[in-house]
Amino acid sequence: DAKTTQPTSMDCAEGRAANLPCNHSTISGNEYVYWYRQIHSQGPQYIIHGLKNNETNEMASLIITEDRKSSTLILPHATLRDTAVYYCIVRVRPSNTGKLIFGQGTTLQVKP
Amino acid sequence: SAVISQKPSRDICQRGTSLTIQCQVDSQVTMMFWYRQQPGQSLTLIATANQGSEATYESGFVIDKFPISRPNLTFSTLTVSNMSPEDSSIYLCSVYEGGNTGELFFGEGSRLTVL
């Protein structure tokens, strides 16, 4: 699976959009971009995933560049409850292994 | 989505002892995984728990230290053997239901402290 690079930490004001970048320059054609987050003292939670088109769900939007070498997770109106570690993961889907390999992630601090 | 229960949620153990962590899912799932999260660190995959056969371990993890069982499609155990303070971590169970999203679900974790 391709390696990802994320900033270690970011701050965001409550009510503003949080834009979390991820670089995955070695991504291959059959690999998807997944985002998970881990709120303190909880297990990771799936947010969204995409292949090459932009995706949106009730939690967030995922913008993938045309060359697929980077992506941005957007939380449109961040709240204090969005404070968490956000993980960008690249892997094949569907996958025979199913497993996820986590990087270090970005710690997002939403401030009042 | 799958609901995952882990027991114990936390424990304090003595060096040299072993502890078994249980993972129960409310539905049959395709795959089950065990992760370790050391203090202040990201998650590291320990192994894939295979039903009715030996688990598949990631590099750096061995069966003697982390024996895993998966007797059916809804239950798995992870044992941390001959514990040392370095084993103090959160151990998380994760499942893959086989759906189209490829999404994994995680338990709340078992926080282990070894003295």
Image: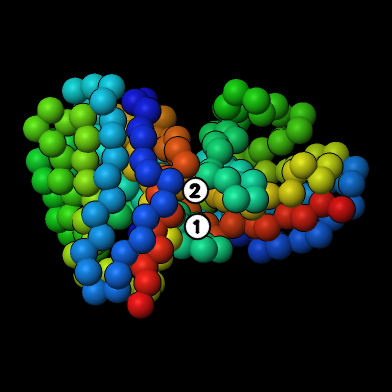
| Residue found at x 24% / y 54% | A19
Asked whether residue B2 is in view, the answer is: no
Indicate the amino acid at tag 2.
Ser
Q: CA distance from mark 2 to mark 1?
A: 9 Å
User: What number is the disc on residue B94?
Assistant: 2
Question: Between A72 and A111, which is closer to the camera in this rendering?
Answer: A111
Q: Chain of mark 2?
A: B
Horizontal and vertical percent position of residue B65 = 76, 33
Q: Where residue B105 sits: x, y (%)?
A: 42, 53
Against A86, residue A75 (above or below) is below
Q: How many marks?
A: 2
Residue at point 49%, 48% (across, down)? B94
Residue B77: numbered disc: none
SS at badge 1 = loop
Asked if disc 2 and disc 1 are in contact, CB closer than 8 Å, the reply is yes
Is disc 1 on the same chain as disc 2?
A: no
Q: Quadrant of residue A15?
A: bottom left
Kindly identify which chain the residue marked by label 1 belongs to: A
Is residue B78 depicted above or below A56 in this figure?
A: above
Residue placed under numbered mark 1 in the picture:
A43
Q: Residue at 25%, 60% (x, y): give it.
A: A18
